[in-house]
Image: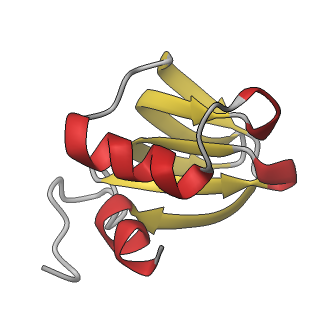
Amino acid sequence: MSGHVFHPGHEELHGVTVVVEGAEGMTWVGRYHERNDRGVQMHDVALYEPASATLPLSAWIERLMKFGIRVDAKHLVIPNESAIRIVRLTEYAQST
């Protein structure tokens, strides 16, 4: 439901599983907490590093959608300059 904020006083994406596309192909998937001057704060995050990946990004996302997120970092702050685009996981999966 667009425009619905689960926790009043927070951003619309608060608590939603999102994909953060980063500089140089880095991609993070996890629960969005907030974006502030420190960066994008997330919880229960899976990390995709193209240099060490065994699957293409689209297959990795598909696997996360099927089996759930394998947490690489319990809490993570992605610097603002590294977070290029943020989109809901369900919307991202539909676009790939």
* Residue at position x 65%, y 57% in the image: 21
Depth order, front residue of 10/2: 2
Q: Residue at x 47, y 36 (%)?
A: 42
The image quarter in which residue 66 lies: top left
Q: Mark yes or no: residue 81 visible.
A: no
Q: In this view, does 72 lie above or below 65?
A: above
Q: Residue at x 71, y 47 (%)?
A: 37
Residue 51: x percent and y percent? 82, 33
The picture quadrant where one finds residue 88 is bottom left
Between residues 78 and 69, which one lies in front from this camera angle? 69
Counting from the top left corner in percent of width and height, residue 56 is at: 62, 49
Count numbered badges in the picture: 0
Residue 2 shown left or right of residue 86 in the figure:
left
Horizontally, residue 56 falls left or right of residue 91, namely: right
Give left or right: position of 78 versus 91. right
Q: Where is residue 7 in the image (x, y as percent from the top left)?
A: 18, 53
Q: Is residue 57 visible?
A: yes
**Residue drawn at the location 73% of the way across and 44% of the way down:** 26
Say how the picture is coloured. Answer: secondary structure
- x, y (%) of residue 43? 40, 30
* Above or below, comparing residue 75 to residue 95 in the picture: above
Q: Which quarter of the rendering shows the N terminus?
A: bottom left
